Amino acid sequence: MSSETPGRGFDAASFLRHCSRKPGVYRMLDADGRVLYIGKARDLRARLGSYFQKNVEAIKTRALVARVAGVQTTVTHDETEALLLEQALIKQHRPPYNILLRDDKSYPYIRISVEQTFPRIGFHRGQRRGQSRYFGPYPSAASVREGLSTVEKVFQLRNCRDSYFNNRTRPCLQYQIRRCTAPCVGLVSEEEYRHQVALAIDFLDGRDDQVSAALEARMQQAAEALDFEKAAEIRDQIAAIRLVQQKQYVDTQRGDVDVLAVVARHGMAVVELLVVRQGRVLGHHSYYPRVRSEDTEEDILEAFLGQYYLGDNGDQALPAEVILDRRVDGVEALGEALRAARQRRVRFAHVVRGERQGWLRLARDNAEQTLIGALANRDNISQRYSALASLLRVPTPPGRIECFDISHTSGEQAVASCVVFGPEGAIKGDYRRFNVNPVQGGDDYAALAEAVTRRYQRVTKEGKPLPDLLLIDGGKGQVRSVHDALAAIGLATLPMLGISKGPSRKAGLELLHRPDGTVITPAADDPGLHLLQQVRDEAHRFAITGHRARRGKTRSGSALEGIPGIGPRRRQQLLHHFGGLQQLRNASVESLAQAPGISHAMAETVYAWLHD
C-alpha cells in the first residue's frame, strides 16, 4: 500500500510552529483554494499536528493530507464557540471530506388553528405563525398524516381550507364518512365543536387517559339521558383511543426524547431517529449521511448530532433528552453550544434503563433493517456490480456470485454456508448449508474443500448454472485448498477470489486473493469492494445461524436450559405465563419483566439468550 505525503507547496512543519494552541476551527484547502475539510479543536496545534505525522493509519486522513495545500484557522474563546462556528462553516461549504447530513428539510407538525371560531386541523411545515397550536415535530410527513387520520376519525375536526369551508351549502364527503361534524353548514354547535377541539389537543399532548375519562363521563351522562345514539358515538371514540394506545410501543405520559442509533457497513450509513413526545412514540425517520468506509459509527453520530441540532431547524426539533446508542465524545460541548444558541438545556445519555432502553432497542432495530434495505436496493446493487467489474478488470460484471464460509465452535459441529447474489441482490432461494466433518476438527481448509466439492458435483450433475465468480471468505491458504478441490472435479477454470481482512483486520483494508497467488488491494471506498464485503458478511451470518441450529439440535432437555439464573421452576413458570416457547420468544424485555419472579435484569438475560 503506497504511502502518501502532504500536498506540494505546503510546509506543515513551519505552519505548526506558528499555529495557536487555543481552541478554534480549521479549514484545510486544496491547491485551488477549495475547502476540503472543516474541523474544530480544543488545541489547534495539537489537533492539526496529528494529521501531519509520518505514520498515520487512517486511509481517509492520508488521502486528505495528500491534497492539502493550505490550512486556515480561526481562534475562538472556547470549544463551544468553536463547535457553533464549525457547524456554520460546514453548512456553508459542504466539504467533501466531512461527514454530511443530506436531509435538511424543516420538520412537519400538526397544526390546530385555535384562533378561529371553528378551528381547522392540518399539516404544517415551516415557521410557526399566529396563535395556532402546534404538535410535534414529527419525524416524517407519513407520521403526521397518520396522526391526522387518527384525530379526524376520533374527534371529527374539519381539515378543509377556509375558502372551501366558507362557501359550503351542504355537507361534504368527510361528513358522510364520519370524519367531520359539518360545522360549515351548522350541523354542530360552536360549544360542542370547541369541546371536541379541546379533547383533540389533550390527546395530541399525550393526555390519553384524561381524554378517555372525560369521554366515559359524557357517555354515562348520555346513557342516563336515554340518548343512546350519542352514547354509542362516544363509545366508538373511546375504543379508537384505546386502539391507538395499544399500537404505541410504550406510553408513559412523560418525556420529550429523541433516540438515535447508527449503523454503518459497506460504504453506507444510516442514522435512525425515533421521536418520542409526551412519552408517546410519534414515529421514526432515517438519514443517510455521506460517509467513507473508514468513518467509524462514533464519528458519524458525532457529526450528525452537531449538524442536526445546530442546523436551521434545531430550535423546532429540540427535546429535553437525547438518547444515543453509544458513547460519543463531544456531547458536553454540544450541550453547552445548544444552551448558548437555543437557550435550552438538553441532556445526552447512552446508558438507559426501562422504557428508554426499549426505545433504544427499537431505534437500533429500525436502523439495521433500513440499512439492509438500502444495501439490497436494486440500483445500488447494479452500481456496485459495475464497479466490481472495474476492480477485477473484466469486461462485464459477474452475473452470479456464490460465497462460502465456515462456522464452528472449537472445531465441533462445523457448518459451511453458500450464499448467492445476482444483479437483483440476494437470491435466498439458492442459499445452501452443509454439515461438514473434516478429519481434523477446526480444519477450515478441508471443511471448505468438502463443501465446495459437494456443492459443485451436485450442480454439474443436475445441470444447474455455475457461478460467474466463486468468493471464499479467507486468504491464500483457503483459496489454494478450494482451487485444488475444484481441479479434482474438473472445474479448475471456475473464476475464484478469496477475501481476507488484511494484517490489521480492519474493515476497508481487505485483500483479494486470486488462485495464481496475485493479490488485489482495493481502495477502502471502492463500491466493488463494498459489494464483496456485503456478500461475505451475508455468508458469515448464514453460516453462524446454521451452526447454532446444528449445535442446538444436539442439546437435550428444554431450550431454556443453560440460561444463567433460570432453574427448572422458573422455566416452568415462564412457559406457563406465556403459554409456550414461541410466545416466550416473541415477548419483549418489558413483557418478560412482568412475569412472576423475573426481575428486569433477569428479563434482559432471558431475552438475550433467546435471541442470540
Image (spheres, rainbow, N blue to C red):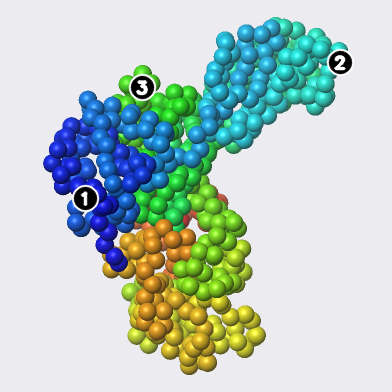
Question: Residue type at mark 2?
Answer: Arg
Closer to the observer: label 3 or label 1? 1
Residue nearer the viewer, 475 or 571? 475
Disc 3 or 1, which lies upstream in sequence? 1
Q: Which residue is mark 1?
A: 52
Q: Quadrant of the C terminus?
A: bottom left
Q: Quadrant of the N terminus?
A: bottom left
Residue 16 is left or right of residue 387, and the answer is: left
Question: Residue type at mark 1?
Answer: Phe
Q: Which residue is mark 3?
A: 341
Q: Which residue is mark 2?
A: 170
Image: 50 above or below 201: below
| Residue 589 appears in the figure | no
Find the distance from the CA under tag 3 to the CA under tag 1. Answer: 33 Å
Q: Position of residue 193 (x, y in %)?
A: 70, 11
Question: Residue type at mark 3?
Answer: Ala
Q: Residue furthest left?
A: 17
Q: Position of residue 402 (x, y in %)?
A: 53, 74
Closer to the observer: label 2 or label 3? 3
Q: Which residue is rendered at x = 32% and y = 26% of the image? A: 337
Q: Which residue is rendered at x = 27% and y = 43% of the image? A: 70
Q: Badge 1 local density, few (<14 within 10 Å), some, or many (20+)?
A: some
Q: Which residue is rendered at x = 31% and y = 34% of the image? A: 331
At mark 1, the secondary structure is loop
Residue nearer the viewer, 230 or 104? 104
Disc 2 or 3, which lies upstream in sequence? 2
Q: Could you say which quadrant of the image residue 413 lies in?
A: bottom left
Q: Which residue is rendered at x = 33% and y = 47% of the image? A: 31
Image: 604 above or below 560: above
Disc 2 or 1, which lies upstream in sequence? 1
